Amino acid sequence: MQTPMEQINDDNLYQDAFLQSVFDAIPAFVFIVDEDVRLHFWNAPARQLVGNDPAQVYLKQGGEALHCIYSIQEKEGCGRTHYCSECVIRNTVSKSYREGKPLRDFARLQRLVGESVTEVYLLVTASPFHYQGNDYSLLLIEDVSHILDETLEKNEPEPVKTEPAITLTASEREILIWLKQGKSSWAIAQILEMNVRTVNYHVYHIIGKLDAMNRTQAVAIAMKMGLIHEND
C-alpha cells in the first residue's frame, strides 16, 4: 500500500502504511502542511476535497487544493491576495507555528467547484511538530455546517417578536452586508471610503453584540435573527 507521498518520492516524509490506515479511518479531513500551508500528506476523506491524483496535489498551496474561490479567481494565488490575511486556515497554522502549540478556530470557506460556489463552515485545528530537521503542522478540518445550522435554529427569536432584541447602527449593518458577500476589511474600507481600522472597530462591536466567535458566525447569526437578509 502506497501513501500519496510515496507515489511522488520514496524519500518523502510519510511512508508508514499502518499509520496511513489510521489516518484514513479518521472521519475529518487530515493534512500535514508546512508553514506556507503546502500539502505534504492528506488522508482518504481529504481526497474528497483535493482529488485523487497525488502528483497534482503534493506541495500545492492549501487554498488552491481546497478550491478556495479567492485563490482561484485572484491572479496572485493562494497566500498572496489581500483576502489571505483574513484566512482562518492560514492564520491558524501560522499562529500555531509561532506559539508552538495546537490552536483551533472556526472558519467559512467559499469553494469554487466547476462553475458553482459552495459555502461551508469549518472547525480548523492546527498542531505543529518537528520531524527530521523540518517543521510541519498537523491540520485537521471538520465540516460543522450542519451543527451550526442546528444551533442557530435552537436560538431563533420567538415568532411573536416583531423586532430583534439586538439592534445595529447603520454603519454596522452596512458592514455586515459586505461581510456576507465575503469582503475583507480592506475591501470594505475601499468601498465605504473608511479607514481599515474604523472597519475593524465596527466589526469588533458587531461580533460582541451578536455574541459570535468571529465575523463569519456573526453574519450567520445576523441572518437568522433577521438583522440582514439574503437579498441585501
Image (spheres, grey):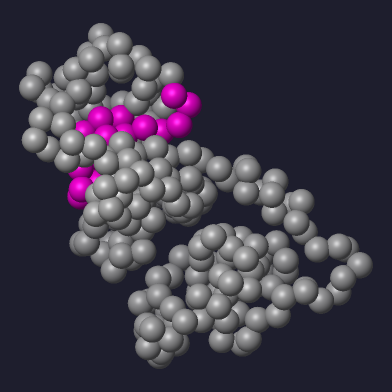
Q: Residue at x 58, y 45 (%)?
A: 145
Q: Nearer the viewer, residue 2 or 36?
A: 36
Q: Is residue 129 left or right of residue 210?
A: left
Q: Residue at x 37, y 17 (%)?
A: 22
Q: Position of residue 48 (x, y in %)?
A: 41, 31
To which quarter of the image does residue 29 belong? top left
Q: Position of residue 33 (x, y in %)?
A: 24, 40
State the residue lying farthest toward the front. 100
The vertical placement of 187 against 22, above or below, is: below
Q: Is residue 34 magenta?
A: yes
The vertical placement of 156 against 149, above or below, is: below
Q: Is residue 143 left or right of residue 185?
A: right
Give the extent of the magenta segment: 26-42
State the residue lying farthest toward the right. 160
To which quarter of the image does residue 2 belong? top left
Q: Position of residue 52 (x, y in %)?
A: 31, 26
User: Looking at the image, can residue 13 be seen?
Assistant: yes
User: Looking at the image, can residue 115 be seen?
Assistant: no
Q: Residue at x 59, y 63 (%)?
A: 212
To which quarter of the image does residue 231 belong? bottom right
Q: Is residue 86 magenta?
A: no
Q: Residue at x 21, y 34 (%)?
A: 40
Q: Nearer the viewer, residue 55 or 61?
A: 61
Q: Position of residue 229 (x, y in %)?
A: 67, 69
Q: Quadrant of the N terminus?
A: top left
Q: Quadrant of the C terminus?
A: bottom right
Q: Is residue 149 left or right of residue 218?
A: right
